[in-house]
Image: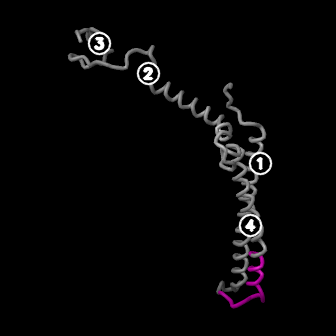
Amino acid sequence: MGKNYDVPAERQAAYYIGMLMLVIGLILFISPMCTAVDAVRESSDSFLDKRTGNPMLSSEPGAMFQTHRKVTDSLPLALVGMGLFAVGAILMSVGRSGPAGSGLVLNPRQEVEDLEPFSRAQGRMLGQMLDEALPSDDSGSAIKVRCRHCRALNDEHDKFCGQCGQEL
């Protein structure tokens, strides 16, 4: 089986559609909060005397009920937003990791297949990190010997110090 780092196109589409649903859901969830803040601000302004700034009992009959109505009318929008957010998150997970890789389907063999692009990419990254961290065989000895005379570091196979020339 050849190395495959690509996620299938249908899973990519599911991931991006899920991301879009998540963003739309977040906007729909937050917008009623803005409506509520705006309605409360409007109602609090209507309870202040315009000349003195002092609170009044009521400037307009039913102002509090209008505020309450604006807030409760926008709650279904928040619930739709929460639903879109949740469905979008699930769709992103399935798109990223596949049905078995995301835990939607319990099938270990399919899970290995679903996660193969990510496993290969992680293995590749680990190999690159090890290549950078560990010295290669052609770079010389990893063990160094310190010269007793000048304290310079030399390779373990050296007979004489590379800095002062004294015998090691």
Quarter of the view holding residue 46: bottom right
Query: Residue 147: x, y in percent?
Result: 24, 16
C-alpha gap between disc 4 and disc 1: 20 Å
Crowdedness near tag 2: few (<14), some (14–19) or many (≥20) residues, C-alpha within 10 Å: few
Crowdedness near tag 4: few (<14), some (14–19) or many (≥20) residues, C-alpha within 10 Å: some
Crowdedness near tag 3: few (<14), some (14–19) or many (≥20) residues, C-alpha within 10 Å: few
Q: Nearer the viewer, residue 100 or 52?
A: 100
| Residue 79: image tag | 4
Quarter of the view holding residue 166: top left
| Residue 163: image tag | 3
Position of 103 with respect to 125 (left or right) is right
Residue that lies at the very extreme toward the left in this rendered image: 149
Q: Which residue is mark 2?
A: 135
Q: Secondary structure at mark 2?
A: loop
Q: Please determine whether, in this image, residue 113 is positioned above or below residue 134.
A: below
Query: Residue 101: x, y in percent?
Result: 66, 44
C-alpha gap between disc 1 and disc 2: 45 Å
Q: Which residue is mark 1?
A: 17
Q: Nearer the viewer, residue 142 or 4?
A: 4
C-alpha gap between disc 4 and disc 3: 75 Å
Q: Secondary structure at mark 4?
A: helix
**Which region of the structure is painted magenta?**
55-71
N-terminal-most mark, 3 or 1: 1
Crowdedness near tag 1: few (<14), some (14–19) or many (≥20) residues, C-alpha within 10 Å: some
